[in-house]
Amino acid sequence: MQQHFTQIPNGFYSVDELQELGLKSIGKNVLLSRLARFYGVEQISIGDNVRIDDFVILSGNITIGSFIHIGAGSILTGGSEGIIVENFVSISSACKIFSTSDDYSGESMSNPTIPNAYKNIISRPIHIGKHAMMGSTSIVLPSSMGLSEGVSVGALSVVIRPTKPYGIYMGNPARRILERSKNLLELEKNFLDSLQISGGGGRNLNSCLTRFYLHTTPHTESQIYNCYGLLRLDSIKVRNDAQRYSFLTESYQENIKNLYRISQNHPTESILLPKERIA
Protein backbone atom coordinates (compact mmCIF):
# COMPACT_ATOMS: atom_id res chain seq x y z
CA MET A 1 0.00 0.00 0.00
CA GLN A 2 1.33 3.40 -0.94
CA GLN A 3 2.06 5.67 2.00
CA HIS A 4 1.83 9.44 1.97
CA PHE A 5 4.00 11.62 4.17
CA THR A 6 3.85 15.33 4.89
CA GLN A 7 6.77 17.45 6.01
CA ILE A 8 4.71 19.14 8.73
CA PRO A 9 1.65 17.35 10.19
CA ASN A 10 -0.29 20.60 10.55
CA GLY A 11 0.85 23.13 7.98
CA PHE A 12 -0.79 26.13 9.65
CA TYR A 13 -0.32 27.66 13.08
CA SER A 14 -3.05 26.98 15.64
CA VAL A 15 -5.07 29.85 17.12
CA ASP A 16 -3.02 29.77 20.32
CA GLU A 17 0.25 29.71 18.40
CA LEU A 18 -0.81 32.72 16.34
CA GLN A 19 -1.35 34.70 19.53
CA GLU A 20 2.17 33.83 20.65
CA LEU A 21 3.89 35.12 17.50
CA GLY A 22 3.91 38.68 18.81
CA LEU A 23 2.15 40.29 15.85
CA LYS A 24 0.82 43.83 16.34
CA SER A 25 -2.70 42.46 15.82
CA ILE A 26 -4.34 39.40 14.30
CA GLY A 27 -7.95 38.66 13.40
CA LYS A 28 -10.11 35.55 13.20
CA ASN A 29 -9.99 32.69 10.71
CA VAL A 30 -6.33 33.24 9.85
CA LEU A 31 -4.44 30.44 8.12
CA LEU A 32 -0.75 31.18 8.46
CA SER A 33 1.79 28.70 7.16
CA ARG A 34 4.44 27.50 9.57
CA LEU A 35 6.90 27.93 6.70
CA ALA A 36 6.20 31.66 6.32
CA ARG A 37 8.69 34.13 7.78
CA PHE A 38 8.12 37.42 9.61
CA TYR A 39 10.61 40.16 10.41
CA GLY A 40 9.60 43.00 12.70
CA VAL A 41 6.48 41.13 13.85
CA GLU A 42 5.50 43.94 16.19
CA GLN A 43 4.83 46.11 13.10
CA ILE A 44 2.65 43.56 11.27
CA SER A 45 -1.16 43.55 11.51
CA ILE A 46 -3.38 40.87 9.96
CA GLY A 47 -7.18 41.08 9.65
CA ASP A 48 -9.87 38.40 9.45
CA ASN A 49 -10.16 35.55 6.95
CA VAL A 50 -6.58 35.70 5.70
CA ARG A 51 -4.53 32.88 4.24
CA ILE A 52 -0.75 33.18 3.95
CA ASP A 53 0.97 30.24 2.27
CA ASP A 54 4.40 28.58 2.47
CA PHE A 55 7.62 30.59 2.09
CA VAL A 56 5.92 33.99 2.21
CA ILE A 57 8.15 36.69 3.74
CA LEU A 58 6.63 39.72 5.47
CA SER A 59 9.09 42.35 6.67
CA GLY A 60 8.62 45.73 8.30
CA ASN A 61 5.53 47.90 8.64
CA ILE A 62 2.68 45.94 7.01
CA THR A 63 -1.10 46.13 7.49
CA ILE A 64 -3.18 43.37 5.91
CA GLY A 65 -6.98 43.68 5.75
CA SER A 66 -9.62 40.94 5.57
CA PHE A 67 -10.47 38.25 2.98
CA ILE A 68 -6.94 38.21 1.59
CA HIS A 69 -4.76 35.46 0.13
CA ILE A 70 -0.99 35.70 -0.24
CA GLY A 71 0.40 32.88 -2.36
CA ALA A 72 3.48 30.78 -1.76
CA GLY A 73 6.86 32.44 -2.11
CA SER A 74 5.60 36.02 -2.17
CA ILE A 75 7.57 38.80 -0.46
CA LEU A 76 6.26 42.03 1.06
CA THR A 77 8.87 44.46 2.40
CA GLY A 78 7.22 47.34 4.22
CA GLY A 79 10.28 49.06 5.60
CA SER A 80 9.50 52.20 7.59
CA GLU A 81 7.06 53.73 5.05
CA GLY A 82 4.81 50.68 5.16
CA ILE A 83 2.52 48.57 3.00
CA ILE A 84 -1.28 48.64 3.39
CA VAL A 85 -3.28 45.84 1.76
CA GLU A 86 -7.03 46.51 1.68
CA ASN A 87 -9.82 43.91 1.84
CA PHE A 88 -10.46 41.29 -0.87
CA VAL A 89 -6.96 41.42 -2.36
CA SER A 90 -5.49 38.38 -4.12
CA ILE A 91 -1.71 38.02 -4.35
CA SER A 92 -0.62 34.99 -6.35
CA SER A 93 2.54 32.93 -5.87
CA ALA A 94 6.02 34.49 -6.01
CA CYS A 95 4.80 38.09 -6.16
CA LYS A 96 6.92 40.93 -4.79
CA ILE A 97 5.79 44.22 -3.22
CA PHE A 98 8.59 46.62 -2.27
CA SER A 99 8.26 49.90 -0.37
CA THR A 100 12.04 50.46 -0.44
CA SER A 101 14.73 50.12 -3.09
CA ASP A 102 18.39 50.89 -3.54
CA ASP A 103 19.51 53.51 -6.06
CA TYR A 104 20.53 51.73 -9.27
CA SER A 105 22.02 54.84 -10.96
CA GLY A 106 25.54 54.30 -9.67
CA GLU A 107 25.49 57.53 -7.67
CA SER A 108 25.53 55.57 -4.40
CA MET A 109 26.49 52.21 -2.97
CA SER A 110 23.95 49.51 -2.20
CA ASN A 111 23.00 46.40 -0.19
CA PRO A 112 22.40 45.89 3.55
CA THR A 113 26.08 45.46 4.45
CA ILE A 114 26.82 49.13 3.59
CA PRO A 115 26.06 51.96 6.06
CA ASN A 116 23.20 54.26 5.05
CA ALA A 117 25.60 57.23 4.77
CA TYR A 118 26.96 55.68 1.57
CA LYS A 119 23.58 54.73 0.10
CA ASN A 120 20.56 56.44 -1.39
CA ILE A 121 17.59 54.38 -0.27
CA ILE A 122 14.33 55.14 -2.07
CA SER A 123 11.24 54.64 0.13
CA ARG A 124 7.56 55.17 -0.64
CA PRO A 125 4.37 54.18 1.19
CA ILE A 126 2.60 51.40 -0.73
CA HIS A 127 -1.18 51.10 -0.85
CA ILE A 128 -2.81 48.04 -2.45
CA GLY A 129 -6.44 48.95 -3.04
CA LYS A 130 -9.52 46.81 -2.46
CA HIS A 131 -10.10 43.98 -4.95
CA ALA A 132 -6.64 44.33 -6.48
CA MET A 133 -5.10 41.19 -7.97
CA MET A 134 -1.50 40.28 -8.69
CA GLY A 135 -0.70 37.48 -11.11
CA SER A 136 2.14 35.08 -10.38
CA THR A 137 5.66 36.60 -10.18
CA SER A 138 4.39 40.15 -10.75
CA ILE A 139 6.24 42.98 -8.98
CA VAL A 140 5.17 46.30 -7.47
CA LEU A 141 8.03 48.77 -7.06
CA PRO A 142 8.14 51.81 -4.73
CA SER A 143 7.79 54.30 -7.61
CA SER A 144 4.28 52.95 -8.34
CA MET A 145 2.99 53.77 -4.85
CA GLY A 146 0.98 50.54 -5.06
CA LEU A 147 -2.17 49.51 -6.93
CA SER A 148 -5.42 51.44 -7.18
CA GLU A 149 -8.74 49.84 -6.25
CA GLY A 150 -9.81 47.05 -8.56
CA VAL A 151 -6.56 46.87 -10.53
CA SER A 152 -5.46 43.45 -11.76
CA VAL A 153 -1.88 42.84 -12.83
CA GLY A 154 -0.99 40.02 -15.20
CA ALA A 155 1.68 37.42 -14.48
CA LEU A 156 5.33 38.48 -14.92
CA SER A 157 4.42 42.17 -14.96
CA VAL A 158 6.43 44.95 -13.29
CA VAL A 159 4.47 47.95 -11.98
CA ILE A 160 6.68 51.05 -11.87
CA ARG A 161 4.11 53.85 -12.31
CA PRO A 162 0.88 54.76 -10.47
CA THR A 163 -2.21 52.94 -11.71
CA LYS A 164 -5.83 54.03 -12.15
CA PRO A 165 -8.82 52.14 -10.68
CA TYR A 166 -10.38 49.10 -12.34
CA GLY A 167 -7.90 48.47 -15.07
CA ILE A 168 -6.03 45.38 -16.26
CA TYR A 169 -2.29 45.96 -16.46
CA MET A 170 0.27 43.80 -18.21
CA GLY A 171 3.92 43.85 -19.22
CA ASN A 172 7.32 45.20 -18.19
CA PRO A 173 6.79 48.00 -17.51
CA ALA A 174 3.10 47.31 -16.88
CA ARG A 175 0.64 49.17 -19.08
CA ARG A 176 -3.14 49.38 -18.96
CA ILE A 177 -4.44 47.09 -21.67
CA LEU A 178 -8.13 46.62 -20.73
CA GLU A 179 -10.84 47.93 -18.45
CA ARG A 180 -11.82 45.68 -15.56
CA SER A 181 -15.48 44.98 -14.77
CA LYS A 182 -16.95 46.48 -11.59
CA ASN A 183 -19.46 43.65 -11.27
CA LEU A 184 -17.38 42.37 -8.37
CA LEU A 185 -18.64 45.29 -6.26
CA GLU A 186 -22.19 43.95 -6.51
CA LEU A 187 -20.89 40.48 -5.68
CA GLU A 188 -19.09 41.93 -2.65
CA LYS A 189 -22.34 43.49 -1.44
CA ASN A 190 -24.25 40.23 -1.89
CA PHE A 191 -21.50 38.32 -0.14
CA LEU A 192 -21.48 40.60 2.90
CA ASP A 193 -25.29 40.57 3.01
CA SER A 194 -25.23 36.77 3.05
CA LEU A 195 -22.87 36.85 6.04
CA GLN A 196 -25.38 38.91 7.99
CA ILE A 197 -28.02 36.24 7.42
CA SER A 198 -26.08 33.02 7.91
CA GLY A 199 -23.00 34.04 9.85
CA GLY A 200 -19.54 33.10 8.70
CA GLY A 201 -16.20 34.64 8.01
CA GLY A 202 -17.18 38.31 7.95
CA ARG A 203 -18.09 38.64 11.60
CA ASN A 204 -15.91 41.65 12.26
CA LEU A 205 -17.29 43.45 9.18
CA ASN A 206 -20.87 43.34 10.48
CA SER A 207 -21.42 44.67 13.98
CA CYS A 208 -24.89 43.08 14.21
CA LEU A 209 -23.32 39.63 14.48
CA THR A 210 -22.60 38.14 17.89
CA ARG A 211 -20.10 35.42 18.68
CA PHE A 212 -20.66 32.66 21.20
CA TYR A 213 -18.25 30.05 22.49
CA LEU A 214 -19.13 26.59 23.69
CA HIS A 215 -16.51 24.36 25.28
CA THR A 216 -17.46 20.72 25.08
CA THR A 217 -15.91 17.27 25.05
CA PRO A 218 -14.71 16.00 21.65
CA HIS A 219 -17.41 13.35 21.14
CA THR A 220 -20.26 15.89 20.95
CA GLU A 221 -19.36 17.37 17.56
CA SER A 222 -21.83 15.21 15.62
CA GLN A 223 -24.51 15.79 18.25
CA ILE A 224 -24.18 19.56 17.83
CA TYR A 225 -24.33 19.26 14.04
CA ASN A 226 -27.43 17.05 14.21
CA CYS A 227 -29.33 19.16 16.74
CA TYR A 228 -28.38 22.53 15.27
CA GLY A 229 -28.24 22.20 11.54
CA LEU A 230 -29.79 25.66 11.21
CA LEU A 231 -26.94 27.22 13.14
CA ARG A 232 -23.90 27.90 10.98
CA LEU A 233 -20.81 26.36 12.57
CA ASP A 234 -18.32 29.15 12.00
CA SER A 235 -15.09 27.63 13.22
CA ILE A 236 -13.79 24.63 15.13
CA LYS A 237 -10.51 24.60 17.00
CA VAL A 238 -9.48 21.26 18.38
CA ARG A 239 -7.45 20.96 21.57
CA ASN A 240 -6.29 17.91 23.50
CA ASP A 241 -8.95 18.08 26.17
CA ALA A 242 -11.74 20.09 24.57
CA GLN A 243 -13.17 21.55 21.37
CA ARG A 244 -14.23 25.16 20.90
CA TYR A 245 -17.23 25.96 18.78
CA SER A 246 -17.81 29.52 17.60
CA PHE A 247 -21.34 30.37 16.51
CA LEU A 248 -22.46 33.46 14.64
CA THR A 249 -26.05 34.51 14.17
CA GLU A 250 -28.20 37.55 13.61
CA SER A 251 -31.23 36.03 15.41
CA TYR A 252 -29.88 36.35 18.91
CA GLN A 253 -32.77 35.18 21.10
CA GLU A 254 -33.70 31.88 19.48
CA ASN A 255 -30.17 30.72 18.86
CA ILE A 256 -29.02 31.54 22.37
CA LYS A 257 -31.93 29.49 23.69
CA ASN A 258 -30.81 26.64 21.44
CA LEU A 259 -27.26 26.84 22.71
CA TYR A 260 -28.54 26.92 26.27
CA ARG A 261 -30.69 23.82 25.70
CA ILE A 262 -27.84 21.85 24.17
CA SER A 263 -25.65 22.80 27.10
CA GLN A 264 -28.27 21.25 29.40
CA ASN A 265 -28.59 18.09 27.32
CA HIS A 266 -24.83 17.65 26.98
CA PRO A 267 -22.99 18.82 30.12
CA THR A 268 -20.00 20.94 29.24
CA GLU A 269 -16.83 22.12 30.85
CA SER A 270 -17.98 25.70 30.47
CA ILE A 271 -20.42 27.69 28.40
CA LEU A 272 -20.03 31.42 27.83
CA LEU A 273 -23.33 33.09 27.02
CA PRO A 274 -24.74 36.55 27.83
CA LYS A 275 -27.22 35.62 30.58
CA GLU A 276 -29.39 38.68 30.05
CA ARG A 277 -30.32 37.39 26.58
CA ILE A 278 -31.59 33.99 27.76
CA ALA A 279 -35.34 34.26 28.18
Image: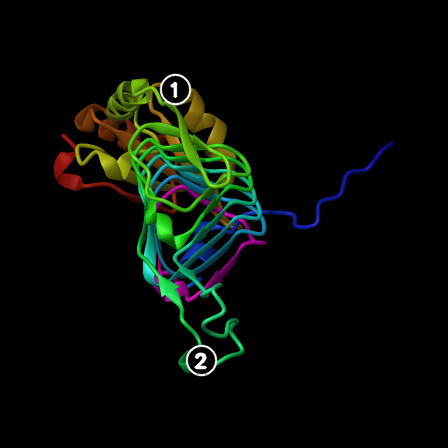
Query: Toward which corner of the image does residue 128 lie, by quadrant?
Result: top left
Query: Toward which corner of the image does residue 161 lie, by quadrant?
Result: top left
Residue drawn at x 34%, y 42% is 48
Front-most of 38 and 235?
38
Per the model, the C-alpha gap separating discs 2 and 1 is 65 Å
Is 186 rendered above or below residue 12?
A: above
What is the magenta range? 23-44
Is residue 25 in sight in this rendering? Answer: no
Q: Quadrant of the C terminus?
A: top left
Residue drawn at x 54%, y 54% is 36
Q: Say whether disc 2 or disc 1 marks the residue closer to the N-terminus.
A: 2
Residue wearing tag 2: 118
Disc 1 residue type?
Gly
Q: Residues within 10 Å of mark 1 (few under 14, many from 20)?
A: few
Q: Quadrant of the N terminus?
A: top right
Front-most of 244 and 269?
244
Percent from the top left, x then y, of residue 132?
A: 37, 35
Disc 2 residue type?
Tyr
Residue wearing tag 1: 229
